[in-house]
Structures are given as C-alpha cells and as structure tokens.
C-alpha cells in the first residue's frame, strides 16, 4: 500500500524548488553528514569535464548573494516540512537555508554525543562549508534550543535569533512540570509517539485548533517522519540538564521571541520569564489563536512578524 505522506514528498519538494531552494548534503567530517535545503542560486552545475562530488551532483558557489536566514526545525518533522510556509515568504529578500538536524531527514553521524551543543557545533561547521559567515537563525521548539546554543557558542556567526515555542535549556524541573501538566509520563511518550493514538495526543497539545486527519494519514506520517527512533530517544535524554547546571548566557545578539499565545507545550508565561532573564536585548511578540505550531497554523501573521524583525535588523545597520 502506498504511503500517502511519502507520496506527497515529491510534490512538496517540487514546490520548494519553485520557491527558491533545493537539497544539498554537507559532508561535515568523516561519518557525519547534514542535509540542507539551500538557495537555488548558490548551486552551479559542474562544467564539462569537471569531476562531480561523491555526495552531490552539483558544486556549491562560495557565498550567498543576500542576507542569510537559517530555519531550524523542531522534533516532530524534518526541516522542509516544518518551514514549508516560510520559504516562499522569505526567499525574495533573503538567502534561506533549512538544515535537517542530526537524525532527521538525511542527516546522520557516527558520533555518540546527543546534546544540543553537538548539534550546534555540527550546524556551525556545515554553515561554514556552505560559505556562510553571518546569519540570522530562526529556531522552533527543539531547534530553538539548538539556535540558542549556536548563538552562545558562535556569536560571530549568529547575528540575531528568532525563537518560537522553545526555551534556553530543558532543565529537569521544567521537563517534569511540563510533562505533568500535559499528562505525559516522559518526553519520549510526548515527542516520539509510536502509535496513531500517541501522534493524535501530540497534535492535540501542539495545535491551537483541533486537527482532524484520518488514521491512515497518521500511520503514514509516523512511518515517514519518526525514523531513527533509538537515536532520537537519545537526543531527548541528552536534552535535559540539571537545574544546578543551568546558566543564562550573556547574548550579544538581538533575540526575538515570536510566540503562539495558546502554546500549551511552552506557554506564554515561560516566554515572558525568559524575556526577563535575557534582558534588554530580547523582545516578545505574541500571535493570537496560535499554538505551539504557530508558524503552520497562522503562517501569514507569523511571516509578517518575522519579516518585520528581519527588516529592523537591516535598519539597525543602516543607522
């Protein structure tokens, strides 16, 4: 029987290419590969007689031609699925890059480190190989924690960050209180469902409005999007840190918190508290009738607010 989600992938990929991006794989180091969607204009075909790379059928140009925006996905889907409604809105004025974090999409590693810090190091190395030396990073949920870590470790690379539905770090107290409030026994039960019932439960807390899909589609989504289950369970274990190990970095970058006001997973109160902890560099905007998946539920409003923030960064340089 045909997997409906897998069957729709070529259509989505075709639409994304029309919107201005196409797939490319970065060989970070032996044993570690990271899949990306990169701007069409940064890729050129090999000239006649030139040797092709072993991973990609094309060569990559050295530098993007526009300001770079890197979109970092959450835990329940790979990059292009997460950000499908943002690519077209941004690609006219920005060079848009969408990575698949390790163990999502085609990204993989033979290293054993499962921390957000390792994800951030690999992402930084990949961006360097793509010719990117300065960017704005937009992170959602799990990707937001990676974005914060990337900004902390590579302040020269990350000019600013936009974060939705995420926190600086998942402490054991936040993890326990969130899971208890949502009625889940573990992060794996919440974020790594293995049944239609479990996926429905995740969607019920992630979306503001109740979403209905036939069970067949839920089953197909589980098969396609929840691969590498052992490694992803390890990623969840590597996410949680002790309260005593938690620190608030002194970020030099501007930080914009763009939030669904009805986010049940990381509620607005957490966002407000984080804004206070981050200080004057941080700003907050809430989006009404938007849940944890605000960028998918209310993409027009989300994109407008995101572009306003990005434009304000350009204005800062001009002054």
Image (cartoon, rainbow, N blue to C red):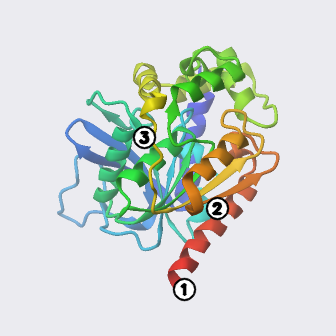
Q: Residue furthest bottom?
A: 319
Q: Nearer the viewer, mark 2 or mark 3?
A: 2
In terms of secondary structure, where does tag 3 sit?
Answer: loop
Q: Position of residue 29 (x, y in %)?
A: 22, 43
Would you name the residue on which mark 1 appears?
A: 319
Discs 3, 1 touching: Cβ within 8 Å: no
Q: Which image quarter: residue 237?
A: top left
Is 7 situated above or below 44?
Answer: above
In 3D space, how far apart are the residues under numbered discs 1 and 2 (Cα atoms)?
20 Å
In the rendering, which numbered label is found on residue 68? none
Residue 270 or residue 264, whichever sits in front: 270
In terms of secondary structure, where does tag 1 sit?
Answer: loop
Q: Position of residue 198 (x, y in %)?
A: 65, 17
Q: Position of residue 177 (x, y in %)?
A: 64, 24
In the rendering, which numbered label is found on residue 306? 2
Discs 2, 3 touching: Cβ within 8 Å: no
Using the rendered image of the protein, determine whether residue 22 is visible from the camera's viewpoint. Answer: yes
In 3D space, how far apart are the residues under numbered discs 2 and 3 (Cα atoms)?
22 Å
Locate residue 63 relative to residue 2 in the image: left or right.
left
In terms of secondary structure, where does tag 2 sit?
Answer: helix
Is 90 situated above or below 195?
Answer: below
Q: Earlier in the sequence, mark 1 or mark 2?
A: 2
Image quarter (top left, top right, bottom left or bottom right) of the N terminus? top right
Image quarter (top left, top right, bottom left or bottom right) of the C terminus? bottom right
Would you name the residue on which mark 3 appears?
A: 101
Q: Position of residue 297 (x, y in %)?
A: 74, 45
């Amino acid at each position: 029987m045909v997997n409906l989600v897998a069957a729709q992938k070529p259509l989505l990929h075709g639409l994304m290419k029309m919107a201005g991006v196409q797939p490319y794989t970065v060989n970070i180091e032996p044993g570690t590969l990271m899949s990306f969607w990169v701007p069409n204009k940064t890729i050129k075909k090999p000239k006649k007689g030139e040797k092709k790379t072993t991973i990609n059928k094309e060569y990559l140009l050295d530098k993007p031609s526009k300001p770079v925006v890197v979109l970092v996905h959450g835990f329940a889907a790979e990059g292009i699925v997460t950000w499908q409604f943002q690519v077209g809105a941004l690609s006219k004025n920005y060079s848009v890059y969408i990575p698949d974090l390790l163990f999502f999409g085609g990204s993989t590693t033979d290293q054993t480190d499962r921390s957000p810090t390792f994800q951030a190091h690999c992402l930084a190395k990949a961006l360097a190989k793509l010719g990117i030396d300065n960017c704005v990073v937009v992170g959602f949920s799990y990707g937001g924690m990676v974005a914060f870590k990337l900004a902390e470790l590579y302040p020269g690379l990350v000019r600013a960050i936009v974060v939705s539905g995420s926190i600086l770090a998942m402490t054991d107290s936040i993890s326990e209180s969130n899971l208890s409030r949502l009625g889940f026994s573990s992060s794996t039960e919440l974020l790594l469902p293995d049944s239609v019932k479990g996926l429905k439960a995740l969607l019920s807390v992630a979306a503001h409005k109740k979403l209905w899909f036939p069970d067949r589609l839920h089953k197909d989504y589980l098969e396609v999007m929840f691969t590498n289950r052992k490694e992803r369970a390890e990623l969840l274990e590597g996410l949680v840190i002790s309260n005593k190990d938690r620190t608030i970095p002194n970020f030099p970058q501007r930080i914009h918190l763009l939030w669904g006001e009805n986010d049940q997973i990381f509620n607005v109160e957490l966002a407000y508290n984080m804004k206070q902890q981050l200080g004057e560099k941080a700003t907050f905007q809430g989006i009404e009738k938007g849940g944890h998946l605000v960028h998918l539920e209310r993409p027009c409003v989300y994109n407008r607010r995101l572009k306003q923030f990005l434009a304000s960064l350009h204005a800062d340089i001009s002054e």
